[in-house]
């Protein structure tokens, strides 16, 4: 008899996410459904605003990647106004976004995703001496010495965590699936992962500081404006640039000595799942492209990450991106209407229809009808996956030398075939590959910025006539957030925003079924997965976390005068531990 599993809430993510799965007698997932259970509605708040202010509000869409929403919103207005920013502004924005990528990827792997691979209770059984030898083995694949690998350190980590266990103070570690047969690492490998988890807590604090050097603060930086950036004094001060560079160099060292070796270790121990394509999902990948490498207008500049679309995992062919082919469907989302609309014409009109009737004390999603606050984006009437894996896949398919070099090196060092990329393991590995690439590029941009300023160029802003350019305009800011393609579309009339739509990475990945009944990326990645124990569905958590969900939301919306327009109460009932 099949079993209907509910995991609500999915923890170790940003936002509110519910996953339901129907598992057959062989413990194989036959159906999967993804639902965001709280409403955002930021687009409505932006209507009637001065478009130059949109970035400061749009960054509140998310509490994690605030800076990337900020920049996308600013770029949408710059595109509408036909403004090209100066070189210093381009480099500063690259540094801020690059720092965000590095921070986000390291935090994701160690603090949000690692415990899907690492059983910390088994780490307490490890032999510290053997753990040093194990760490050396995996670091050798990267041609590095292992990070913080000593018998004393590993023994201290065990002692520290043992105290928490004995005192019943496991905190966020307390309600997990420890001891599950779905865990495959040895005690020594678990201890390596646990040690690096703690080390990464210290490192992420430093990388967050780096983002504030040019952003003014973190989260919610303040230094990006339509036309450029405002951090003139920081770029003029070589000490500030050097401080930023020094922090990123530390992050690069950690990535080479800890992050990459840990992913090699996990990839090897879970190789059977990777080779079988567990968690592969849709097989369609899209990248908007990002990080301008020259000073041409934004969508004409060469980029670190190329744009494009790859279908059906076919690396021999890549399609050029056409933003006019992007639409959003709301057939199975809690909004009025069913038709596909381009974001320029998008409508955010809530229509909450609730859950199905309770059964055995659990209210299940009404998956035949509407069941999520997330819309279903389509590209050329196809479902897409976005994110680091998509960027690596599109880069390799396009023959990008830089990306191909990093991907090839990772696969060669790990003795892994290309097909392992199309799996939960591969999606996780793509972030590690990208982190190494990003660290090295950010260091180069630091040098480029310092050299440009030293040459006497202190320009940080491009002047424009607001009254003229804001009369009747529309534009889009399309680039890559750490989690994937992020787009902001704005229409402006007589100096005010008349329509605004944002399609975020987790809109693409976490979306419900579309009007043809085709699954979203999370949903498709779960179907066909075999779980060891349906009552402890670690495999579901592991695959969903591999996307790094960021389900930013707000419970109610207000108009520009602060008047409450509507309140939506969602009462998800029942579920498994996550």
Image (cartoon, grey):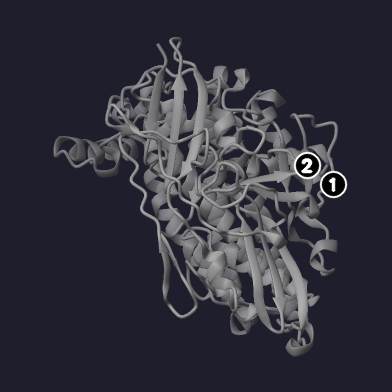
- Residue at horizontal 52 percent and vertical 44 percent from the top: 548
Residue 210 visible within the image:
no
Residue 505, relative to residue 117: is it above or below?
Answer: below
Question: Nearest the camera: 386 or 495?
Answer: 495
Q: Quadrant of residue 141?
A: top right
In the image: residue 8, left or right of residue 68: left
- Residue at horizontal 35 percent and vertical 29 percent from the top: 119
SS category of the residue bearing label 1? loop
- Residue at horizontal 78 percent and vertical 62 percent from the top: 293
SS category of the residue bearing label 2? strand
| Residue wearing tag 1 | 320
Give the image location of residue 110, x and y in percent: 44, 43
Residue 14, relative to residue 152: is it above or below?
Answer: below
> Which of marks 2 and 1 precedes in the sequence?
2
* Total numbered circles: 2
Give the image location of residue 79, x and y in percent: 77, 71
Q: Quadrant of residue 67?
A: bottom right
Q: Farthest left residue? A: 167
Q: CA distance from mark 1 to mark 2?
A: 6 Å
- Which mark is on residue 239? none
Give the image location of residue 212, x and y in percent: 51, 70
Give the image location of residue 480, x and y in percent: 67, 54
The reply to whether the C-beta atoms of the residues labelled 1 and 2 are less than 8 Å apart is yes
- Which mark is on residue 309? 2
In the image: residue 205, left or right of residue 414: left
Residue 492 visible within the image:
yes
Residue 315, relative to residue 470: is it above or below?
Answer: above
């Amino acid at each position: 008899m099949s079993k209907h599993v509910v995991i609500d809430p999915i923890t170790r993510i940003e936002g509110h996410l519910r996953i339901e799965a129907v598992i057959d007698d062989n413990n194989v997932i036959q159906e999967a459904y993804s639902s965001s259970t709280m409403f955002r509605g930021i687009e409505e708040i932006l209507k009637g605003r001065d478009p130059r202010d949109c970035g400061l509000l749009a960054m509140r869409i998310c509490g994690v990647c605030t800076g990337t929403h900020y920049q996308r919103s600013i770029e949408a207005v710059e595109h509408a106004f036909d403004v090209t920013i100066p070189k210093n502004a381009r480099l500063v924005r690259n540094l801020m976004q690059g720092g965000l990528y590095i921070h986000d990827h390291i935090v994701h792997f160690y603090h949000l995703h690692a415990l899907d691979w690492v059983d910390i209770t088994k780490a307490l059984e490890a032999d510290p001496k053997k753990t040093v030898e194990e760490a050396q083995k995996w670091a050798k694949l990267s041609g590095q010495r292992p990070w913080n690998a000593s018998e004393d350190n590993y023994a201290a980590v065990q002692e520290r965590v043992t105290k928490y266990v004995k005192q019943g103070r496991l905190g966020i570690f307390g309600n997990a699936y420890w001891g599950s047969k779905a865990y495959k690492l040895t005690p020594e490998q678990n201890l390596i992962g646990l040690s690096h988890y703690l080390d990464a807590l210290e490192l992420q604090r430093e990388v967050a500081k780096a983002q504030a050097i040019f952003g003014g603060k973190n989260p919610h930086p303040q230094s990006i404006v339509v036309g450029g950036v405002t951090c003139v004094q920081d770029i003029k001060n070589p000490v500030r640039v050097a401080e930023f560079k020094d922090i990123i160099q530390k992050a690069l060292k950690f990535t080479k000595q800890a992050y990459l070796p840990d992913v090699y270790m996990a990839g090897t121990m879970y190789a059977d799942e990777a080779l079988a394509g567990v968690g592969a999902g849709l097989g369609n990948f899209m990248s908007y492209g990002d990080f301008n490498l020259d000073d041409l207008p934004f969508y004409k500049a060469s980029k670190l990450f190329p744009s494009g679309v790859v279908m059906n995992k076919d690396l021999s062919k890549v399609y050029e991106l056409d933003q006019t082919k992007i639409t959003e469907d709301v057939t199975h989302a809690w909004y009025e209407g069913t038709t596909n609309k381009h974001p320029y014409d998008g409508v955010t009109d809530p229509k909450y229809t609730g859950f199905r009737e309770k059964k055995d004390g659990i209210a299940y999603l009404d998956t035949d009808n509407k069941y999520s606050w997330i819309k279903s984006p389509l590209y050329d009437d196809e479902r897409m996956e976005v994110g680091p894996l998509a960027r690596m896949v599109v880069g390799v398919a396009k023959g990008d030398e830089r990306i191909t070099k990093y991907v090839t090196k990772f696969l060669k060092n790990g003795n892994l075939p290309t097909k392992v990329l199309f799996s939960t393991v591969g999606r996780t590995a793509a972030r590690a590959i990208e982190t190494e690439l990003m660290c090295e590029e950010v260091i180069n941009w630091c040098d480029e910025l310092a050299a440009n300023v030293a040459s006497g160029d202190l320009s940080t802003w491009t002047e424009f006539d607001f009254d003229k350019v804001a009369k009747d305009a529309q534009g889009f800011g399309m680039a890559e957030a750490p989690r994937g393609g992020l787009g902001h579309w704005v229409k402006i009339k007589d100096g005010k925003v008349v329509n605004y739509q944002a399609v975020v990475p987790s809109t693409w990945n976490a979306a419900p079924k579309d009007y043809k009944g085709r699954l979203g990326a999370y949903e498709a990645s779960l179907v066909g997965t075999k779980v060891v124990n349906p009552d402890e569905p670690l495999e579901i958590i592991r695959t969903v976390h591999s996307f790094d969900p960021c389900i930013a939301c707000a419970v109610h919306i207000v108009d520009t005068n602060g008047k409450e327009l509507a309140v939506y109460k969602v009462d998800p009932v029942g579920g498994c531990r996550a």
